[in-house]
Image: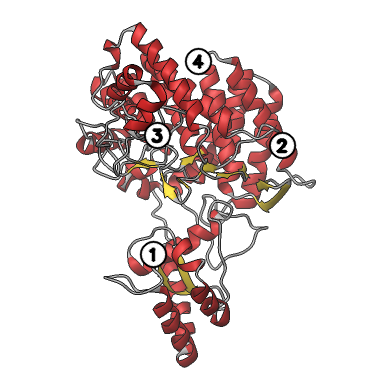
């Protein structure tokens, strides 16, 4: 949509003549994204990106939608037609539009910002695991059908439950999902690291974007699997995740960049896919065919005439050492060759929240795998955030880009960073980390706590006050700030015996208790408290 609509001169002329167009980076301002996504779900029953919102000068929405091509076609309304309609509506029925937008805001406040308080059901974990068993894909791993997202919280829940209750089925489900994700094309077998999600049920065809937070959370999941099973494959996958991260996602100062785009030269996945002839020309017939057979690369291809390297259907335990060494030698040749291609764009903004997740990931994995380098990298990331992303008055900021720090940190920034600091303290026993975690947690409670109804708001009382001030505990691709904050405070209580921390953690659970009980799998991270 960016290419076909927003970069089009005719569209731009209409937008600039009749509207005030504002483009929001949802990674820099997840508070704005969350607010207007709530309206999208209220008005249309669904949400998604790109999210396009028509709003009054008071920032109140009256029309929302996702994808609009430039011209109307099939079932899609064209953006040019839509802009005309919105212009006419505003000019002819302005008072009605404003009245309707006011009504929409009030309805969302009463319907979408009401929370079902109560105690979380005692059998919540059993219910959650049973739900996972019912939706588990026994053939390809994962849960439900396509598209498939990694959802590390499900893996962690199953591993913990299986380990505590000697439930072999839960551990099998976690292992089969982890094995299938690694074998699939959603893992980059040439340069390592995980892509965003799989568009098919087999984990073969990914959305080729690589996100820092996915790799951080999967680093924790695979490390936990190694801790529970002691199977070497999971340790190897962790090492490959971090090899990619240290090579492609780390700044000179030790902070971590946000993402690698899915496309290069305007084509999604072009950087990652292979042509059989290219492989033979580069490696020769013998090595080329050997590698092609191993990684499912053929003249027909498995993705738009090209091939995504994958190990789907392979029994990795049966591969002899000589073959493994030969494959690795060839892989390094292919990696060096691939490095000469036009790379996907790297988003070099450094986000406090996502760095907090990587800080937690490296600290936890370093402890489980007895790898001092990971803990050292975590310490450098900590120093980067503390030195670059805290204002002189102590206020945490969310974004660092082009040598500038800006945007007041949101709940997720505080919660994820505190999580990372707690893991770092666990791995080093250095009291300065515990002290900083407690200090940041105190600031978080002061800025975000809802004194009237409990729980933590998405943005602070010193930040830009948007048309609604939401709070939630729903875990999606990213954990919710409330869930991680509740976990953090219970862990900090265990170190300090500060009863206020325990009470605040329990208060969060009570604030959202009925919601958690009704939909346990939507709250996977906070279930670790039960």
Residue at image mark 3: 152
Relative to 380, 361 lies left or right: left
Residue at image mark 2: 386
Q: Position of residue 414 (x, y in %)?
A: 61, 43
Residue at image mark 1: 67
Whole-number angstrom distance, CA of label 1 to CA of label 3:
29 Å
Q: Are marks 1 and 3 in contact (CB under 8 Å)?
A: no
Quadrant for the C terminus, please.
Answer: top left
Tell me, for residue 369, which label it has, or none: 4
Quadrant for the N terminus, please.
Answer: bottom left
Secondary structure beneath dot 4 equals: loop
Secondary structure beneath dot 2 equals: helix
Secondary structure beneath dot 1 equals: loop
Whole-number angstrom distance, CA of label 2 to CA of label 3:
27 Å
Label 1 vs label 3, nearer the camera:
1
Residue in the picture at 64% in, 51% down: 447
Is any atom of residue 492 visible in this view? no
Mark 1, other Cα within 10 Å: few <14 / some 14–19 / many ≥20? some
**Front-most of 119 and 353?**
353
Where residue 38 sits, quadrant-wise, is: bottom left
Q: Position of residue 328 (x, y in %)?
A: 42, 16
Point out the tag, 1 or 3, that comes first from the N-terminus.
1
Point out the tag, 4 or 1, that comes first from the N-terminus.
1
Task: Using the image, determine if residue 79 lies above or below residue 178.
Answer: below
Whole-number angstrom distance, CA of label 4 to CA of label 1:
45 Å
């Amino acid at each position: 949509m960016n290419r076909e609509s927003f970069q089009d001169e005719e569209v731009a002329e209409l937008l600039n003549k009749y509207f005030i167009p504002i483009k929001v980076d949802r990674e820099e301002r997840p508070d704005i994204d969350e607010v207007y996504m709530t309206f999208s779900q209220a008005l249309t029953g669904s949400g998604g990106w790109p999210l396009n919102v028509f709003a009054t000068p008071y920032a109140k929405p009256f029309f929302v939608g996702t994808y609009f091509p430039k011209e109307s076609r099939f079932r899609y309304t064209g953006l040019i037609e839509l802009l005309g309609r919105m212009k006419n509506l505003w000019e002819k029925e302005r008072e009605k539009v404003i009245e309707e937008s006011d009504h929409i805001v009030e309805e969302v406040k009463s319907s979408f910002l009401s929370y079902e308080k109560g105690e979380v059901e005692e059998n919540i974990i059993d219910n959650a695991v049973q739900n996972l068993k019912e939706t588990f894909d026994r053939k390809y791993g994962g849960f439900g059908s396509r598209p498939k997202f990694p959802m590390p919280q499900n893996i962690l829940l199953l591993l913990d439950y299986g380990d505590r209750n000697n439930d072999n089925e839960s551990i099998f489900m976690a292992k089969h999902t982890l094995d299938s994700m690694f074998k699939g094309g959603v893992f980059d077998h040439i340069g390592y690291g995980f892509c965003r999600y799989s568009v098919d049920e087999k984990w073969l065809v990914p959305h080729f974007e690589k996100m820092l937070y996915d790799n951080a959370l999967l680093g924790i999941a695979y490390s936990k699997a190694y801790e529970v099973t002691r199977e070497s494959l999971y340790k190897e996958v962790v090492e490959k995740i971090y090899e990619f991260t240290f090579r492609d996602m780390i700044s000179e100062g030790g902070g971590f960049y946000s993402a690698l785009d899915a496309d290069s030269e305007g084509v999604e996945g072009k950087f990652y896919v292979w042509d059989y002839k290219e492989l033979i020309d580069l490696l020769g017939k013998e090595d080329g065919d050997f590698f092609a057979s191993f990684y499912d690369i053929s003249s027909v291809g498995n993705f738009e005439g090209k091939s995504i390297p994958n190990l789907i259907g392979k029994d990795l335990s049966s591969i002899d050492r000589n073959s493994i060494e030969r494959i690795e030698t060839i892989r390094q040749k292919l990696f060096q060759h691939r490095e000469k291609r036009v790379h996907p764009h790297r988003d070099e903004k450094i986000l406090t929240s996502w760095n907090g997740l990587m800080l937690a990931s490296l600290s936890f994995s370093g402890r489980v795998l007895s790898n001092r380098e990971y803990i050292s990298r975590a310490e450098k990331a900590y120093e980067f955030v503390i030195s670059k992303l805290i204002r002189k008055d102590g206020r945490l900021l969310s974004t660092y880009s082009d040598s500038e720090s800006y945007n007041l940190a949101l709940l997720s920034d505080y919660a994820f960073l505190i999580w990372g600091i707690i893991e770092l303290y666990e791995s080093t026993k250095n009291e300065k980390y515990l002290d900083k975690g407690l200090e940041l947690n105190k600031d978080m409670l002061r800025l975000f706590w809802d004194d009237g109804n409990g729980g933590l708001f998405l943005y602070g009382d010193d930040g830009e006050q948007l048309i609604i001030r939401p709070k939630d505990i729903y875990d999606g691709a990213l954990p919710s700030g409330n869930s991680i904050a509740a976990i953090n405070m219970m862990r900090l209580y265990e170190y300090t015996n500060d009863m206020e921390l325990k009470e605040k953690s329990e208060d969060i659970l009570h604030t959202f208790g009925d919601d958690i009980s009704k939909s346990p799998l939507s709250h996977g991270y906070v279930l670790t408290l039960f």
